[in-house]
Image (cartoon, helix red, strand yellow):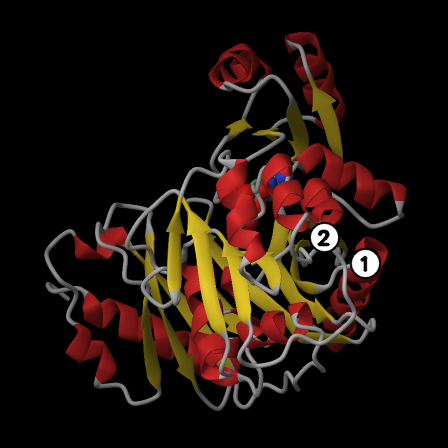
């Protein structure tokens, strides 16, 4: 279904998915007087705890998806691995924003990279891998190390393996459960950057600038805003991001993740057609957060200012922090510039994103140091 009419406060927004991104979206939506329905196979979820209604059914239950979409004014999503059939069933009864075609392109590494390459965007060199012979040829072409990734349904480094020598090829090939894979050249990067941006129904564009991301075990660890790179690089990252959103005709929020190579080139690593972990700082540190902007964009409203009020940094809180018991919240909160966000997840498993801290300071360096200090304070034995 399509409509250009604005969806105003009081209306109900449908969210496919029920994790922390949906939770923070729902907080922003309820603050502005909207109702929120969330749809996922789980109960008592991070989004469901905030939403007006938590619909619990498998994504494959298309009748349940249709019923969900019938009762909302617009459907958005908080993860990109939404099945095509689910997206199509929802779109029969409510506008789906971003569109099914944005989902289709960005939920599959090969389609995404092929799209980016075709439109002249800078991407990490890649090759489609179907057989062991493809893999060996790719490794010879790129050299080792290289990274073998599943084409679909991967996140936080899941489904990827670094191959350090040709001898490891066979074992790496046998490890993957999925047939279609992508081999990427290993990028010896200077740093990782991302730009979270939003595009409205009328084509208006806003962004939160280039931010700097440090990963640990393939999972985002700390984001620093603004990125400590030259103005030229930061500008270039925003220009590329804008072109990606325009080429995809995104209505909503999309994040472009980049590698900055040691010789100063930006390469796109991947796209996420939704608010992104590297944009969480915007909740505390910007005039309009990525979540409120997603709401404004999918409702056909004017976008808000994205001004950064103060340099900021965000540190993820993974389940590992709970290994010696409940983290020492008071110790971190004793630092008054630090904000705590917890996602309401019940089981703190290692590697699971349970929450994050944001800190603001006079400089990006100081914000990064402060948020790290706050996180260390959470450890009982620190
Ligand atoms: P991804 O799930 O593809 O975003 O990968 C997660 C993280 O793994 C990235 O943010 C990088 O830190 C690292 N990584 C992934 N692909 C590559 C690559 N081709 N070269 C170097 N590091 C990579």
The image quadrant where one finds the C terminus is: bottom left
Q: Quadrant of the N terminus?
A: bottom right
Q: Which mark is residue 249?
A: 1
Above or below — where is 13 with respect to 371?
Answer: above
Q: Nearer the viewer, residue 159 or 190?
A: 159
Residue 372, percent from left and from top = 34, 70
Question: Quick check: is the Cβ at mark 1 less than 8 Å away from ligand 1?
Answer: no
Q: Is residue 64 among the parts visible in the rendering?
A: yes
Q: Is residue 257 above or below residue 84?
A: below
The kind of secondary structure element at disc 1 is loop
**Residue drawn 81% across and 67% down?**
239
At x 76% / y 23%, what residue is drawn? 141
| In this rendering, position of residue 56 left or right of residue 145 | left
Sequence-wise, the earlier of marks 1 and 2 is 2
User: Where is mark 2, residue-wise?
Assistant: 99
Q: Which numbered dot is residue 2?
A: none
Q: From the viewer's perspective, is 79 left or right of 231?
A: left
**Ligand 1 image-quadrant field:** top right
């Amino acid at each position: 279904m399509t409509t250009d009419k604005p969806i105003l406060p009081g209306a109900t927004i449908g969210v496919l998915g029920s994790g922390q991104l949906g939770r923070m979206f729902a907080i922003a939506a309820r603050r502005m007087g909207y109702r929120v329905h969330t749809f996922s196979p789980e109960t008592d979820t991070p989004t469901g705890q905030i939403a007006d209604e938590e619909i619990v059914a498998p994504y494959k239950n298309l009748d349940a998806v249709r019923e969900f979409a019938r009762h909302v004014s617009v459907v958005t999503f908080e993860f990109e691995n939404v099945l095509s059939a689910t997206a199509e069933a929802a779109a029969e009864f409510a506008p789906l924003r971003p569109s099914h075609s944005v989902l289709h392109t960005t939920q599959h590494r090969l389609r995404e990279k092929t799209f980016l390459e075709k439109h002249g965007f800078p991407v990490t060199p890649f090759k489609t891998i179907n057989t062991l012979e493809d893999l060996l040829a790719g490794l010879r072409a790129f050299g080792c190390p290289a990274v073998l990734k599943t084409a679909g349904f991967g996140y936080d480094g899941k489904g990827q393996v670094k191959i350090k020598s040709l001898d490891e090829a066979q074992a790496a090939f046998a490890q993957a459960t999925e047939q279609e894979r992508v081999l990427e050249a290993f990028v010896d990067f200077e740093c990782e950057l991302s730009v979270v941006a939003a595009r409205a129904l009328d084509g208006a564009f806003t962004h939160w600038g280039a931010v700097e991301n440090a990963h640990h075990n393939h999972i985002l660890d700390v984001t620093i805003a603004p990125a400590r790179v030259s103005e030229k690089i930061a500008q270039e990252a925003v220009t590329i991001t804008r072109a990606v959103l325009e080429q995809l005709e995104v209505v909503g929020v999309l994040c472009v993740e980049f590698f900055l190579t040691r010789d100063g080139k930006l390469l796109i690593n991947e796209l996420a057609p939704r608010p992104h972990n590297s944009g969480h700082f915007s909740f505390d540190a910007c005039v309009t957060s990525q979540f409120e902007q997603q709401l404004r964009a999918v409702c056909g409203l004017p976008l808000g200012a994205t001004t950064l009020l103060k340099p900021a940094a965000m540190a993820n809180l993974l389940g590992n922090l709970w290994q010696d018991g409940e983290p020492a919240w008071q110790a971190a909160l004793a630092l008054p510039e630090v904000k705590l966000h917890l996602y309401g997840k019940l089981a703190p498993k290692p590697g699971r994103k349970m929450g994050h801290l944001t800190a603001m300071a006079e400089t990006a360096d100081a914000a990064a140091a402060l948020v790290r200090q706050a996180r260390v304070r959470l450890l009982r034995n620190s």
